[in-house]
Every structure is written in structure tokens, then in C-alpha cells.
Amino acid sequence: MFEPLIRLRHIERFYPLGKQQFFYVLREINLDVEEGDFVSVMGPSGAGKSTLLHLLGMHDFGWTGEYFLSDAAVHQLKPKERTTLRNEQIGFVFQNYNLLDDLTVYENLDIPLSYRRFSKSQRSALVADTLDRFQIVGKKDLYPRQLSGGQQQLVSIARAVIASPKLVLADEPTGNLHSSQAEEIMQLFKKLNSEGTTIIQVTHSETNAAHGNRIVQLRDGWIVT
């Protein structure tokens, strides 16, 4: 029997408020995500959605519990080992795109490859293939400020998947886009998912959430569905 891609067991995230007092952002999170899932995490502001995503993305280490990604016990890894695992297996898509303003589209796509063991010729080939796949060859020498919001998010998604990560984490990926651009981005996510990419998105949009095959609801740090 295959293990899930992600297993979270008794995950909690809290901050001390004072003597013997704590503010809990996540409470007793137990969650399995299968390879090939497209999970939408929903809930009101302050429910813990982004905290959960940053935990999964290994940007936040201040939690307790057990986190398994594939066969790696993340909770037992040293910070440097977690960084290596994150760079090799996870791609990120952010609401504000997080492209590097002083790099061209081509150079932004090359960045994730620089963290992995690709030769220069392999990197060039992967960037060229990705530019073609996402139909942005004509944008390769432009800077982010020369692109529309939808184009920037397209580049952001291309960057997230260029090295074929096992998992893509998306935090409000259409939050800054108008409805037609948002629909294009969600259709792109569905296509990537159909090709085997596991996706977890945080969203306030029920329309976006419906594109996934599972919805996880958070309330006050607890999973309620």
C-alpha cells in the first residue's frame, strides 16, 4: 500500500502570550494528501490557512507534531536538510507573484534550477521548453514590471513547476487578478494537476476551490471538515 505524499499528525502552531498563556494558530492538524490531489484550503481570515501553507512549504519551523513528505520525516530534519528538500520537491505560487524585479522572465525561470543539480545546458533546455509550454517565449527578455498581472502570475506558475516538483503550494493565486484572468489561471492549475502535479491552494473563492478535488475547511486553527 502506498503512503500519502503528505502526512500531518498532531500539528500545532502557537505563540506565547505571557505566563503559561499561548495563542494557537493551528490546533491538532491531522491531514493526508495523496499524490495527484488538488486540495483547496478555505476558511475565514485568521483561520490559519496561510500558516498551514508556510508550514507545508518549510518556511516556518516553529511548530510541533509530525510532518512526512514522501518518505522524509520533515520534523526530524535539520534546517539545511529541510531547505534542500523544499528546493527539490516544492514549487510556490504567491498572490503577489514574488518575481524578482531586476531579472528578466528568462532569468526568473532559471532561478529554481540553480538550486538543483542541472548543468548549464540542461537549464537552458528546461527554460526554453517551459517558455514554449506556457506560450511566453515572446516575454523572455521582459522584466516583471513590463507584464500584466495575469502574465506575471503565468510566469510565477511556470517558475513553480519548471523543475517538476512533487508539490505546488499556491497562496491566493488569483487574489490580484480579474475574473477572466483568474479562470485562466485555475484552468492552468487543473491541467497541471491532470498531468500529475499535486496542488494545495489557499483561497477565499468558492469558484476557485471547486476546481480542486478536495476542500479542507479551517476554523480558528482547527480542521472542521
Image: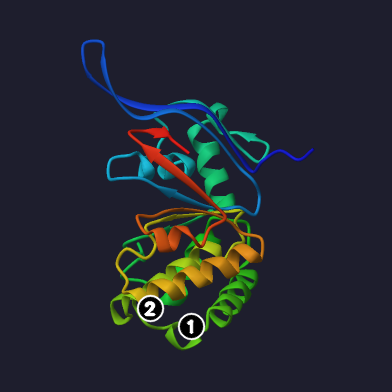
Q: Is residue 34 left or right of residue 47?
A: right
Q: Residue at x 65, y 54 (%)?
A: 36
- Quadrant position of residue 205: bottom left
Q: Is residue 121 visible?
A: yes
Q: Residue at x 66, y 50 (%)?
A: 35
- Quadrant position of residue 155: bottom left
Q: Is residue 20 left or right of residue 50?
A: left
Q: Which is more toward the observer, 92 or 101?
A: 92
Q: Is residue 59 visible?
A: no
Q: Amino acid at mark 1?
A: Ile
User: Residue 181 in the image: x percent, y percent?
Assistant: 38, 76
Q: Is residue 46 left or right of residue 61?
A: left
Mark 1 packing: few (<14 Cα in 10 Å), some, or many (20+)?
Answer: some
Secondary element type, mark 2: helix
Q: Earlier in the sequence, mark 1 or mark 2?
A: 1
Residue situated furthest bottom in the rendering: 138
Q: Which is more toward the observer, 129 or 218?
A: 218
Foreground disc of the pair 1, 2: 2
User: Residue 188 in the image: x percent, y percent?
Assistant: 52, 71
Mark 2 highlights which residue? Answer: 180
Q: Is residue 34 left or right of residue 38?
A: right
Q: Which is more toward the observer, 147 or 128?
A: 147
Q: What is the CA distance from the residue labelled 1 to the residue labelled 2?
A: 18 Å
Mark 1 highlights which residue? Answer: 136
- Quadrant position of residue 177: bottom left
Above or below for 36 versus 132: above
Q: Residue at x 33, y 80 (%)?
A: 147
Q: Amino acid at mark 2?
A: Ser
Q: How many marks?
A: 2
Above or below for 88 versus 10: below
Above or below for 204 versus 26: below
